[in-house]
Image (cartoon, rainbow, N blue to C red):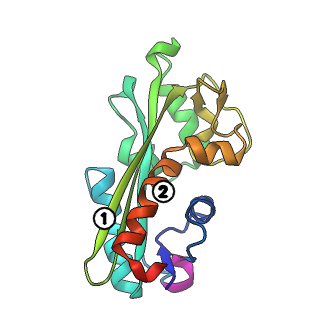
Amino acid sequence: MPLLVATHNAGKLREFRQLLAPLELISALERVPDLKVEESGQTFAENALLKARAFAEASGLIALADDSGLEVDALGGAPGVLSARYGGPDLDDEGRCRLLLHNLQPFPEPARRTARFHCCLVAWAPDGRHCQADGVCEGLIAPAPAGEDGFGSDPLFFVPEHRQTMAQLPPSLKNQLSHRGRALRALHPLLLQTFPELR
């Protein structure tokens, strides 16, 4: 049985396929391309659960959804669950990065620019079986974007131990370090225990 990934984001789907191999993953675009779920939760876990349950019920398949985002300490944890909508619907990734840098101008010192990527994953079956895992990656917000790979805030998220942003790291290393990679590795055994039909 395939596992439906409840995202329209090609970058996320690519990471999921790399980290959950050899499970068969299909995109929500293939089964329920028009389904949109309002992310009305107050936490990453609540939003991931809303999406996973809605996509499972609409498709009849086990659905895997994530909610993830950037938490910047100097901004009180913002943008948090609003990361993909930070600054409003008219901004793209580049615009959201510019807004973040603007809002961090009062905090030029690296020690004041601590941040983390947080990811929560929920897998839900139409019969109500489910499992969940989280992953976190700690870092700093760089003074300017760097790197061509990745998406979202990756060009601004500096990983001190590697002295590069997420967008500069090779994909294999990024998958080891990233919040989504850590969450997916934690979820993998839970998927097989909860949903043996995926084997």
**Mark 2 falls on what kind of element?**
helix
Q: Are marks 1 and 2 in contact (CB under 8 Å)?
A: no
* Location of mark 1 (residue): 49
- Which residue is nearer to you in this view: 39 or 47? 47
First to last magenta residue range:
26-31
Tell me residue 193's x, y (percent): 36, 70
Which residue is rendered at x = 74% and y = 42% of the image?
A: 148
Between label 1 and label 2, give the one nearer the viewer: 2
Q: Amino acid at mark 2?
A: Leu
7 up-or-down from 120: above or below: below
Task: Decide: few, some or many residues near mark 2? Use Cα within 10 Å; few <14, some 14-19, many ≥20.
Answer: many
Tell me residue 156's x, y (percent): 60, 33
- Which residue is nearer to you in this view: 115 or 127? 127
The prevailing secondary structure element of the residues shown in magenta is: helix
181 up-or-down from 141: above or below: below
- Which residue is nearer to you in this view: 58 or 161? 161
**Mark 1 falls on what kind of element?**
helix
Tell me residue 85's x, y (percent): 44, 50
Q: Earlier in the sequence, mark 1 or mark 2?
A: 1
State the CA–CA distance, disc 1 to disc 2.
Answer: 15 Å
| Residue 37 seen in render | no
* Location of mark 2 (residue): 184
Which residue is rendered at x = 35% and y = 33% of the image?
A: 77
106 up-or-down from 23: above or below: above
Q: Amino acid at mark 1?
A: Leu
> Is 27 included in the stretch rendered in magenta?
yes
> Is 15 included in the stretch rendered in magenta?
no
Based on the displayed image, in which of its 4 quarters is residue 54 positioned? bottom left
Which residue is rendered at x = 49% and y = 78% of the image?
A: 199
- Which residue is nearer to you in this view: 45 or 148? 45
| Residue 104 seen in render | yes
